[in-house]
Structures are given as C-alpha cells and as structure tokens.
Image (cartoon, grey):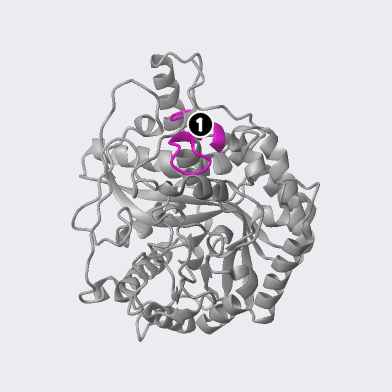
Amino acid sequence: MSNRWQVRPIIEKGHAIGGAAGCHTQCNIYCLATGLADDNATDMAFPDDFLFGAATAAYQVEDGKGESVWDYVVHNFPERVEDGTTADVTCDSYHKYKEDVAMLKELGVNFYRFSIAWTRIMPNGTADYINEAGVSYYRNLIKELKDNGIESMITLYHWDLPQQLADIGGWLEDSMIDIYAEYARTCFQLFGDDVKFWTTFNEIKEFCQLGYGEGGLPPLHYEPGIGEYKCTRVVLKAHAKAYRIYDEEFRATQNGMIGAIFDTHWFEPRTNSSEDVAAAEQGRQFSFGWFANPIVNGDYPEIMKTRIADRSAKEGFNQSRLPEFTEDEIGVHQRYLRLYRSQHCIEEPEIGDPSYSKDMAVSQYQSPDWEGSSISWLKVVPWGIRGLLNWVRETYNDPYVIVTENGYADDGVLDDDMRIHYYQSYISNVRLAMDDGVKVLAYTAWSLMDNYEWLNGYTKKFGLYNVDFNDPNRTWTPKKSMEYYKKVIATHCVIDNCTR
C-alpha cells in the first residue's frame, strides 16, 4: 500500500473536536436550569481523606514560550479556530501565577492540576538547551502552591508538542520515545522533590486519533486507520519508559504517584439485546481499552487485534495496521480518568478505506433527551461516569482512580446554575461509584478559570472563574459555581446536609 498521509483540508467549524465517521453524534442543545437535579444528588459525604482539585493546561492559560504545534496551526491556519483567535496571551498565567494560586486558595482545593509547557523548559524540544527562566517559573508556581497548602499535580504533556519535534515526524517516530523520556527525567529532577502527583500524557486518544489519524487537530496529519495506531504505540512506549525512570530513579526519594490520563466515551447498550451489549463493550475496548489494556495487561484488547488484523487483510495490507508490542515493552502503574460524555451503539461497516471508526464498528448515538451544553458533543449524563468507573474497576483489577477532568461549557455567564447542576450530579455519581466499591482518590473540576478552549478559541467557557479577555489585566470574577464547589470541598458534601 502507498503512504496515504496528507494535511487534511479545512474542516467545518465545530467539527474539529469529537465525532468520527459513522452515525453523527453532534448537535447543539441548550437547556435552562429548571430544578437543579436534586434527584441526582446523594446525601452521602465523601471520606475525610478524599481530595478535591481544579485544573488547567499550560497552552490554555500561559504565554511567552517556544513554538508548539498548536502555535503553528493557530497562527498559520486561523480559519480552523472558531473565532480566529490565538493563545498568545490567554489568561497570562505566566505573569499572574500568584493570582491563580489566590483563586485556588479561595476555592479551598487540595491540589492543582496543571501542565508544563515542554517548549518553556526546552524551547528546541530537546535537553541540549534548558530555559532557566521557564524552570524558575514552574519552581515559583510550585512553591507558591506549597506555601498555600496546595499540592501540585503535574501533567508532562498536554498536547503542546514542540514544533521542531513535529517537523521530524512527531509521535510517529520511535526517536520520540527517548526524547520524551529525557524531558520527563529532566522534569522529575527539577521539580520532583515538591510534586506528589505526575501524569505523563493527557488524553492520548484525542491527540493521536484527531492529530495523526483524522488530521483535525495539530499537527494535522491525515492518515486514518494508520496514523493513530502508530502514534499510540510510540506514546505508550514513551509513557512506559518515563514511568520506569520515575520508578527506578526517583520514587524512593520523591515518593510520588505517576500515571497516564485516558479520556473516553461511556458506551451504553441501546437495548438489552446481546448484540447491543456486545457492541457497547466493543466500543469501550476501542475507546478506553486501546490505552489501558497495554498498560495493565501488556497488549491491546483482543477485539482490537482481531478486528484490525482481519480488516487490514481484506483491505490489501500485508500485516495488521495495528502495530504489535513486544512482551517487555509495557509496565503496570496507576490509572487516571477523564469523562464527559455517554453514547449508545451498534453496526458493522463495509470494507473500504481504513479508519479507526470502521475498525471500532459501532454506531454512536446521543439521545436528544439528554441535557446539552454550549459544546455540541458535551451532554449532561451523570450516570455515565458511575457506569464507567464501575466498568474500570471490574475490567482492570480494581485500580485506584483519579478523575482528572470533569466540567461544563457555557458562554461565561456568572450565574451559572447549569454548571452547578452538572457538578452536583456528576460528583454525586462519583460518590455512588465509591459506594459501589470503586477506589476513587480524587476529583478534579475543569477548569479553574475560563481559558483558550483549543479550536473553539474563546467562544466556550468551562471556568469556575470568569476571565475578562478584553481587559489587558485579565481580571477575573468568581462565578456562582465557584461558591458551590467551594462549599462541596469544605463540607465533602454535594447538598446542605450529608450523612456520615
């Protein structure tokens, strides 16, 4: 077969994130907050040692660093961003980090999940040049958090690959494994004495499938049914190497936790038929098992291996489009989780051009009865997170889990009752999952403040704090949801009175 990659043509606005071939699942539904879902609210308190946090990502809130793949795309293809904006300044957290920590202190969180901008530490992408100003920034941020009683949860890679590394093939190249491992080692050396929570990669599925398969996200590599599998193999091997470096060189003295973050749909069978039940499980394995199974069990899910090998042969490939692992390549570690949406499923596509969605072969459907948000793919389906957490427990040997992102998008309104409704119902279902036996350690609200929402630009807002992007000082104002989440953190309870 010929090498079939190319830069994908400009895609329609609003279709850049989420949604693949097959049954189209995106639609805009706006709902009013009528009766804040007390029926979904539990009266069970969280354990006293349960941790609550808030999150951001470097590209979405910082400025003034080396060029990443996102910088390259938003500057050279502004039509791909919904409002044509850039993240050149965004929240200006580089200069206003003390104000960010003041927000966190007011909120009362136990930890702050943020990411390190690779290009701020290593502007060229490699360890031959370390930017001391960037190192000082993160050291100052970590110290400020620690001085205020807030732990740091650091994500090493939140999508912002240095452009110079993309120019040599990025996550398609095996050379990235050692390059990333050295970046990770450098971060452990520089910051690890004051960091107890590390995550290696954020949402591998998103940047591999949409960045190297479908081509809708940076670096715009279009190689469906091939590129996403190449990318995933390299990234999982890079994760495993970074994990082992931490385990062998740093854990004994730094005593931290390290894992990877997986995002996923929750696939619920449309009916109780055996066909729909099997299709839902197939969707889960292609969405979550694709990443979790190699790390926990050493290889891809059997359904992925079998289906992709079979379809590859019928498409004329000499070997499976899903690259194999050797037995010693992947190790075991903590799992991390992000969830926003739920799906229903069925169906088998005909043989044709390869694609991930055809390999998965389930028809994805979102009920029009589910409440919506200002982002078309984000539905309010709180029982989905409980179902997913229980499935992870049953499928992957009862791991400890941290929910690293969960949040609601709107237009930035201060009286954000729908966000309160969202948090109340989702946090309740996390607590119910814990009562089911799931070992959830922590919950993280996304996001601390309104920021640059990737290809949606500044049109969609997830923040607990409103940020005025028209003000050079980027002034911020707490939303109604901030007061609600603050109370949840203080009382460990989603309603006014809980049982203990």
454, above or below 44, in the image: above
In which image quadrant can residue 494 be found?
Answer: bottom left
Q: What amino acid type is highlighted by mark number 1?
A: Gly
Residue located 38% across and 62% down the image = 459
Which percent across, then down, holds residue 50?
Answer: 52, 73
Q: Is residue 192 visible?
A: no
The mark total stands at 1
Which percent across, then down, holds residue 487?
Answer: 43, 83
Residue 227 within the magenta-colored segment of the rendering: yes
49, above or below 341, in the image: below
Callout 1 secondary element: helix
Mark 1 nearby-residue class (10 Å; few <14, some 14–19, many ≥20) = many
Q: Nearer the viewer, residue 253 or 221?
A: 221
Q: Which of 7 and 136 is in front in this view?
A: 7
Q: In which quarter of the image is the C terminus?
A: bottom left
Which percent across, then down, holds residue 443?
Answer: 48, 67
Which percent across, then down, holds residue 99?
Answer: 59, 79
430, above or below 42, in the image: above
Q: Going by the picture, which residue comes out furthest to the bottom? A: 497
Residue located 54% across and 37% down the image = 232
In which image quadrant can residue 179 be found?
Answer: top right
Give the left or right position of residue 424, taking residue 151 as reference.
left
Residue pointed to by mark 1: 227
Q: Nearer the viewer, residue 257 or 356?
A: 356
461, above or below 279, in the image: below
Residue located 34% across and 20% down the image = 352
Give the left or right position of residue 300, taking residue 414 as reference.
right
Q: Is residue 322 visible?
A: yes
The residues colored magenta run 213-232
Give the left or right position of residue 348, taking residue 140 as reference.
left
Residue 500 within the magenta-colored segment of the rendering: no
